[in-house]
Image (spheres, grey):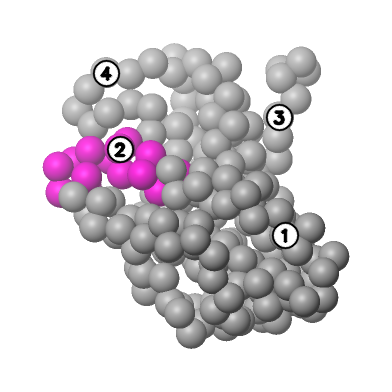
């Protein structure tokens, strides 16, 4: 027998919620093992979500003292990225109307994955070396923050504590489900959302 309270005490409530909502389809049987739970915590929650939030806030603080607005210096890759953010609410709503909870969460994490890819493609650390590209750098970070904000708002139904932490760290109360062109950010200090678990010790 596996007791949920014991798992929560060890891994945290949102990690446990994430595993069971994402890994076990509604009204179906599913598989639970500690190894799979730890794999999801390390891979999805700590790496894809937590690392994205920490990296983005850290760059915003490092390059702009935490104050980031949209300078609207766009590149070709921005259009598809922003379109994926704006499409997310409709896709998640459709999945939830069909009680496809796991798929709804997957769609949110697809945008988070796209955000990490966007960092790799735009290379903010390279842009930061050229003063002439400062406005482009700020636009990139703004786009990332909007992606994080929208994903955090949509995650509130599934990971309420984590969503609250993200919105607190990026210091916003805006709950719109779409990309806002004229938002602004005064960022707080990043702190890990999920700690990676040492699988060798486990």
| Viewer-proximal residue among 26 and 95 | 95
In front of the other: 139 or 9:
139
- The image shows residue 166, relative to residue 43, as above or below, that is below
What residue would you read off at disc 2? 103
Mark 1, residue position: 124
The answer to whether the residues at label 1 and label 2 have Cβ atoms under 8 Å apart is: no
Q: Secondary structure at mark 3?
A: loop
At horizontal 63% and vertical 40% (from top left) the residue drawn is: 46
Which quadrant would residue 110 be assigned to in this image?
A: top left
Q: Which of pointers 3 and 4 lies earlier in the amino acid sequence? A: 4
Whether 100 is among the magenta residues is yes
Measure the alpha-carbon separation of dots 4 and 1: 44 Å
In the picture, the disc for residue 202 is: none
Q: Using the image, determine if residue 8 lies above or below residue 125.
A: above
Q: Residue at x 54, y 79 (%)?
A: 72
Residue 170, by quadrant, is bottom right
Q: Mark on residue 29?
A: 4
Estimate the spatial distance between the alpha carbons at disc 2 and disc 4, rounded to whole Å: 16 Å
Question: Callout 4: helix, strand or loop?
Answer: loop
Whichever of callouts 2 and 4 sits on the residue coming sooner in the sequence is 4
Q: Quadrant of residue 58?
A: bottom right
Q: Name the residue: 70% across, 40% down.
A: 195
Q: Secondary structure at mark 2?
A: helix
Q: What is the number of the mark on residue 197?
A: 3
Give the Cα distance between marks 3 and 2.
25 Å
Of the two numbered discs 4 and 1 on the same chain, state the one appearing first in sequence.
Answer: 4
Which of labels 2 and 4 is toward the front? 2
Q: Which residues are magenta?
A: 95-109
Q: Nearer the viewer, mark 1 or mark 2?
A: 1
């Amino acid at each position: 027998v596996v007791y949920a309270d014991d798992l929560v005490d060890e891994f945290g409530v949102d990690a446990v919620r994430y595993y069971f909502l994402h890994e076990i389809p509604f009204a179906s049987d599913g598989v639970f093992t500690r190894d799979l739970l730890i794999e999801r915590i390390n891979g999805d929650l700590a790496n894809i979500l937590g690392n994205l939030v920490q990296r983005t806030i850290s760059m915003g603080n490092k390059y702009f003292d935490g104050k980031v607005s949209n300078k609207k210096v766009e590149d070709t890759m921005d259009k598809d990225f922003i379109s994926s953010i704006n499409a997310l609410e409709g896709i998640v709503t459709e999945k939830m109307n069909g009680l496809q909870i796991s798929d709804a969460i997957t769609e949110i994490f697809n945008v988070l994955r796209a955000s990490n890819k966007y960092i790799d493609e735009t290379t903010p650390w390279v842009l930061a070396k050229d003063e002439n590209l400062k406005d482009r750098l700020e636009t990139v970070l703004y786009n990332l923050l909007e992606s994080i904000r929208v994903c955090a708002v949509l995650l509130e139904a599934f990971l309420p504590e984590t969503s609250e932490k993200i919105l607190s760290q990026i210091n916003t109360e805006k709950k719109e489900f779409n990309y806002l062109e004229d938002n602004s950010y005064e960022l707080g200090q990043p702190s890990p959302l999920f700690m990676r678990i040492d699988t060798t010790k486990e």
